[in-house]
Amino acid sequence: MKTRLISVAVVLVGVAGLMAGQVFSQDHDKKGDQGGPDPAMMEAWKKAIAPGSFHAHLKPLEGRWSFTTKWRMTSEQPWEESKGVAEYKWILGGRFLQQNTVGDPMGPDGDRFEGMGITGYDNGAKKYTSIWADNMGTGTMVSSGTCDASGKVFTFMGTISDPFTGEPKKEKSVLRIINDGKHVFEMFSVGPDGKEFNSLVVTYARS
């Protein structure tokens, strides 16, 4: 893990250096030997990487929550239930919202449920992005989506590898912010018959 982090850091430093080099090169072409970055270009860059109104739509999620989860593997199975707590906090200068979750024991070994996710808004791609991982599998769910005009309903389309077949599996998820004290997250899976069904409902209440 430490080696991987070092590798990522090296890549990021390289990217930053490349971007800085491009800015300097373009400015040098325009100003000759006078040097110094182009103020207009730097201002545009600053605006492009700043959190904005779409990030603000996620602010009602910040804080600590209690939740009740209902899930099922197929549309014919009865719902199973569990409870837990979650905390959302802003990271990286308010650009991403990190969620940490702990819940009742689940899975074949009876381990308590642990999960974490990061959600943000990509100003360049003009879409929300999300990544989720938990101790009920070894894969990560990578999703992207949009919100409606109210800024309170978010719809994501994601992909995760099927643990039995290894094939990519598509999942749709919908997050509804009801009010400052409640939000609901749902997932919709595709069953063996090819039809979509509601496979997960998590109801959060502020604690």
Image (spheres, helix red, strand yellow):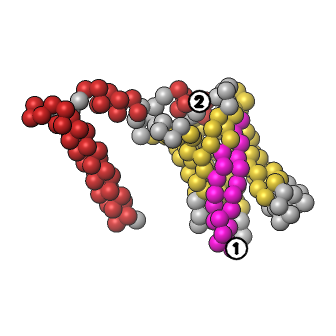
Residue at (20%, 41%) from the top-left corner? 25
Q: Is residue 163 or residue 112 the one in the foreground?
A: 163
Q: Residue under circle 1?
A: 164
Q: Is residue 167 magenta?
A: yes
Residue at (59%, 66%) from the top-left corner? 138
Residue 57, disc? 2
Q: Is residue 86 or residue 177 the one in the foreground?
A: 177
Q: In this view, does 59 lie above or below 140?
A: above
The amino acid sitting under disc 2 is: His
Q: Is residue 83 or residue 9 the one in the foreground?
A: 9
Q: Does the magenta stretch include residue 169?
A: yes
| 109 with respect to 47 (left or right) | right
The answer to whether any part of residue 88 appears in the image is no
Q: Where is residue 128 in the image (x, y as percent from the top left)?
A: 57, 40
The amino acid sitting under disc 1 is: Phe
Q: In which quarter of the image is the N terminus?
A: bottom left
Q: What stretch is highlighted in magenta?
A: 156-176
Q: Where is residue 108 in the image (x, y as percent from the top left)?
A: 72, 70
Residue at (73%, 30%) from the top-left corner? 178
Label whose residue precedes the other's in the sequence (1 or 2): 2
Residue at (48%, 28%) from the top-left corner? 52
The answer to whether any part of residue 160 appears in the image is yes
Mark 2 packing: few (<14 Cα in 10 Å), some, or many (20+)?
some
